[in-house]
Structure formats: structure tokens, C-alpha cells
Amino acid sequence: MRSVQELLQQLHEIAANPRARTEQYLTEGKKIVLTAPVYTPEEIIHSMGLVPMGAWGGDMQLNESKRYFPAFICSIAQSIVELGIAGAYRGASAIVIPTLCDSLKVLVENFKYGVPAIPVVPMSWPQNRVPDFGKAFTKAGCERVIRDLENITGAKYSDGALRASIKVYNAHNAAMRRLSAVLRAHPEVGAAARSDCFKSAFFMLKEEHTALIAELCDALEAQGAGEAKTTPIYISGILADSPAFNALLDEAGLSIAGDDIAAQSRQYRTDAPEDSASPLDALAEKFANMNHCSVLYDPSKSRCAFIAEEAKAAGAKGVLLVLTKFCDPEEFDNPLIRRACEAAGLPVTIIEIDRQMVNYEQARTAIETFRDMLA
Ligand code: SF4
């Protein structure tokens, strides 16, 4: 069995260098399909023998993308176009972009013009996803993705292959849920390494990532519970992969007991049922069953109580809301989340982050003050 350190180092290298993984898959003769946030139906891409590769942008200075976006569009959407223009996605056969927020709708059009070499496949999810007409809409959206990918890549779709891929993705969801629980008992792993465990999932075939995460969980469990003297917190937001941000948490002695981060645990909560009438019905059911997310329609905002309950259950002493700058869906929810958490006796701090951020001193002050509040 490999050591925890060896496994974390491998996950770090994959998370830090997606280009190396892309080149590896291209050399093996595989075709890459980029998957933009959030909830891209990766199972379809995987079932067609294509490699889904996460495209959530990167921490960088935005220059060229400013010709396409107004300044108030989130830096995730902008940096996807910036990276595309810079050639970071060269070799990709297509990009699938869901249209669950206004920034992503704008991204669909701007990517077409900014990065004409990579065809765009939009995925239109319905907001009313639960009624039968909503599920029919989801199915039609998936069928459009299949049609476009067949035309662009020449790959073929089959129900049998999609059923098999759904099993692969459900197994990966389970592995990631286990990981979250195992890491809770091992605060010594730290926020930066925890982020690598989640981020690396975007750049590997899910069956490969499942095996690696299972090996890591086994190794951590074999070495017994961790002993780091940290203060456990719960984090919520869209993204929390910035090395500078995670270093601040580690330096402040804050460990992540659980998360509602869209790029981390939020995407792994819901499985597609494996006994649906057809695999496309299973994907429609999966989307209908998803909840507690800022980009999913929920007039009752049950997400706020859910976060407070999850944080309590995880043993968190407080909740850190990691707000991606200019993310309207999250901005609307944050005051309600704060109210629900404070009513549950959990202190809350909001910090705003941005993919263009170079100076984290304001965030450092906020995080250190938060740590002192929880002591
Ligand atoms: S961060 Fe917010 S605004 Fe940006 S793509 Fe995600 S949900 Fe949309």
C-alpha cells in the first residue's frame, strides 16, 4: 500500500497540472471534451468513449477575455475564455456548457467567438426540474448534447454504454462522500491537500479517480485518527481551490469538517437511479432530485437550513462563506444562509474571492479574526 503522503503528492500533481493529464489522454488516442460548471452531464460524455475534462477557469490575470465580457461577470466564466484564447485547452474536441446562471449563458456565446477552434455544446437544464414536463425538458437537453457530440466527434451513443457510465459515476460519488467523511477525521491533511483531492477529479477518468481516492481513504483509515490541533469549520460557495486561500486556512489552523462547495461535495450528493426506464430518464431523475444549490430553483430556500444542519452534524464551530465575486446566485443566498446558521448558534464569516486576486491580506485578516472568534 502506498503512503498517504505519496497519494496526496500524486493528487496534487494532477490538480496542479491538468495539461499533463490532457496530453496523456491525447497521446493514448482519446478525445477530450471540456466540461464547464455546473452539473454538466458527464455520464453522457464518458459513455461515448470521450474524456470529460473539467474547465472551471484558473487563477490568472484577465486580459483578452475583457474584450468579450463586461467587468461584472464572474471570473470563472471570464477565465475559461481567457484560457481558451491562450491555447490552454488545445486538443479539446468540444466544450459542454450548462446554462444555469446568467454568466454561463453569456459564456456560451463568448466562447464561440473567443475560441472558435473548440465547438460549443450548450446544455439547457430546466429550472422547473421536478414536474414531468421538467424531466422531459432535461431529457431533450441531454439528447441535444448527444446529437452535437456525435456530429462533432464521430463518437456513438448507446443506452447500454450510458447505463454502465452511470454506475461508474455513482461509484465515484460514493467515493467522494467517503473521502469527505474520512478527511473530517484527519484534519492534519489540511485544506490545501483536501482541495487537491477534489480538484483532481476534474482531470481524470472517474474510474481512475475512484481507485485513487479509495486507496487514499484506506491508507488514512489504516493510520488511525489524526491529531492536529485545528478548529473545524464548514465552508460553502462555488469554488475554493485557490492555493493562496487554502494556505490561509492551513496557516490559521482551520480545518474543513465539511463543505457545500459546488466544485467539491455539492456535485456528489445525488446519484442517478440505476433502475430507471432508460438511462436518460435516470439523468433526468438525478437532476430532479438535486437540491440545496444556489443555481437550482428552490423558492423555499431549504438550502440555508440544510447548510446549518450539515455544519452542525460535521462538528463545525463556524461557517465560512466563500463568495465568488459577482456570483449573483450565491450573493442572493448568503444573507439567508447567515441567518439560518446564526440561529443554529454557528458564527458566520463571508470572504469574497476572485480568480484574479493576487493580494489575500484582507482575506487573511478576516480568516484570522474568524478563527479567534471561534476559539
Ligand atoms: S460562479 Fe456563480 S455566476 Fe459564476 S458561473 Fe458559477 S454560478 Fe454562475
Image (cartoon, rainbow, N blue to C red):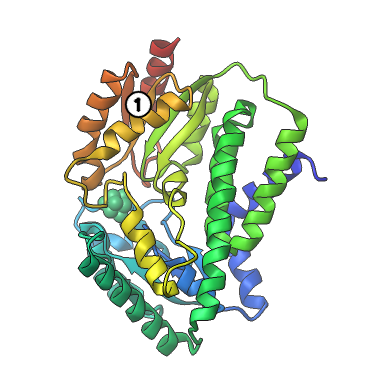
Residue 142 location in percent, x, y?
A: 35, 74
Residue at image coords 26%, 31%? 337
- Whether residue 116 appears in this view of the structure is yes
Neighbours of disc 1 within 10 Å: few (<14), some (14-19), many (20+)? few
Lateral position of residue 185 relative to residue 71, left or right:
right
Q: Measured along the vertical axis of the image, is residue 328 above or below residue 56?
A: above
Quarter-wise, where is residue 123 in the image?
A: bottom left
Residue at point 48%, 80% (across, down): 159
Residue 68 locus on image (x, y percent): 24, 65
Q: Is residue 160 left or right of residue 308?
A: right
Q: Nearer the viewer, residue 122 or 307?
A: 307
Disc 1 element: helix
| Residue identifier under label 1 | 362
Residue type at tag 1: Gln
Which residue is at the far right?
Answer: 1
Residue ID at (55%, 78%) = 161
Q: Is residue 74 above or below residue 335?
A: below
| Residue 90 in view of the camera | no
Ligand 1 closer than 8 Å to label 1 CB: no
Question: Residue 361 or 266: which is nearer the viewer?
Answer: 266
Q: Is residue 182 left or right of residue 316?
A: right
Rendered residue at 38%/11% (across/down): 373
Location of residue 348 by image quarter? top left
User: Whole-percent x and y of residue 350?
Assistant: 30, 29
The front one of 372 and 340 is 340
Question: Which part of the image, by quadrant, shows the N terminus?
Answer: top right
- Residue 323: where, in percent of width, then height? 31, 38
